[in-house]
Image: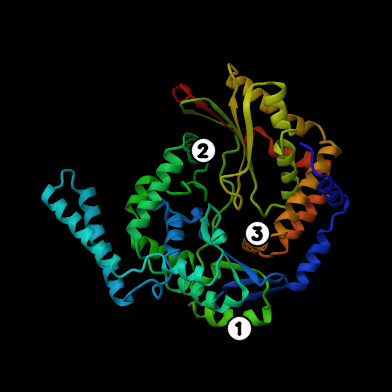
Amino acid sequence: MVLPTGFTAALALLLAIPPRGADELASFEKRATVHVLENGWTFVIVERPGPPVLAWSTVVDAGAARDVAGKTGLAHMFEHMLMKGPTTVGSRDPDAEARAIGDEEEAGRALAQARRREPRPDPARLAALEARFRETQAAAARLTVPNEFVNRLRRLGADWRRLGAWTNFDRALFETSIPSDQVEAFARLESERFRSPSFREFHQERSVVREERRLEIEGQWRNRVLELVQGAVFRDHPYQHPQIGAADDIESLTRADAEAFFRSCYAPGNAVTAVVGDVRARELVPVLEREFGRIPARPRPAPLDSAERFVPAERRLALEGPWPLYFEGYVRPGVAHPDGAALAAIVDVLAGGLASRLHRALVVERKVAAWAQLSPTFPGRRASNLLLVMAAPLGRATMEQMERATREVMERLVNEDVSEEELTGFRNRARVQFLRGLDDDQDTATALAEHHFWLGDWRELFRAREREQRVSAADVRRVARELFQESRRVVIRVGPGQGRR
């Protein structure tokens, strides 16, 4: 592909500029304010003159790693519930709606108990319980104005493309982009849902989450395999449960479970919000004090024990599947580890494009794989996790050939220094990706919130980039020696007959 001349010149100029991480950090520090409310909620405010718009990203320590056995899926489920808004929005009569929701929950619990506890439930009794449940659902629905919370945000001008919530293992994320002159009205709405969530339409959302699991996990064989790999490897670890929840657990979740999760994980001190764009800290802080300061302080949940819990020996697993896949993973440290820059360089050298070592060795030269991919942090990045190679055998290639070819790639990183050309490519790609992220206020807000949440200081976003620009071949080789050890290796072979070996 031939790039336009202007684009080529601009890119060449950008790559010729020496690393300016420190300059970028200094520039942000002049415009950044960190404000912590008395209840513990932390705000990172970055004044960035431009269009009259601001990006708002909230990160909460309420990811799937907070789920517990028997109630998996709560983290994901509660993210759905918060999009319903507070009790004060979307209700025709808040007090009557609260009573109706309580009646619905009671009827749903009675129906679930009858289905679980009675091996052969009386058909007439079961029909009566189902009718009662449908009746209470309808009564609660009559008191609800559907989607009113989201519609109010949109009437304030919230950008529907960046309005939403996402949960992974490490955090729950809530993003919004709004006109800057609507920040007070938005802050009132946003603080209300974190102060007093409504929990309306709980059973309907539970069905939505169950359907998500059916489509995204049960209906996609590769995702099913990855969930099996995760469950086999991460035992007695924050990542031990399915991110979206187990099917039986989802179907048995109750509103009381969600309320308990909210009280535990959604304490104000467990949240970090970054606000970036057309904003003045001196004007915004009083608004935050007034609106978010109303939320009562609650104890934060105990820190997750993210210590590595892997037996120091190679683990080999075989899983049954309709077609063959090869996985090779290595236990790596979480996001706070000081060798993060060298690990990022290893990931880039292994899988940073079609010229990377994995693709070149397995697909182009050896021709043992139809494709080869790398997940740098599976299934999360905050705690210890796996650098996971995934590849599909090509033609009659055997698992032994796949393993041998993959192992040679890793051993080369251990035994030889990476080339200066590879390191320069890594530095340039990392810098372009970083600058591209800074160009978008919403991406910047989310990155700042996550780094402050994970590492205790938003500045680590910039310091990590500085460390990437300084990483050396010796650093990469040292970390490769520590990482690619047999005692840290997990090999998973998937395919017809594999599970019977």
Marks 2 and 1, Cα distance to the nearest angstrom? 47 Å
Mark 1 burial class by Cα count in 10 Å: few <14, some 14-19, many 20+: few
**What amino acid is at disc 2?**
Leu
Look at mark 2 in the image and give the residue it sits on.
Answer: 226
Look at mark 1 in the image and give the residue it sits on.
Answer: 286
**What amino acid is at disc 1?**
Pro
- Report the colour scheme: rainbow
Q: Is residue 390 left or right of residue 249?
A: right
Residue 379 can be seen, yes or no: yes
* SS class, disc 1: helix
Residue 385 locus on image (x, y percent): 60, 45
**What amino acid is at disc 3?**
Asp
Residue 317 locus on image (x, y percent): 52, 30
Look at mark 3 in the image and give the residue it sits on.
Answer: 443
Residue 361 locus on image (x, y percent): 71, 26
Residue at the spot x=49%, y=53% of the render? 64
Earlier along the polypeptide chain: callout 2 or callout 3? Answer: 2
* SS class, disc 2: helix
Image quarter in which the N terminus is found: top right
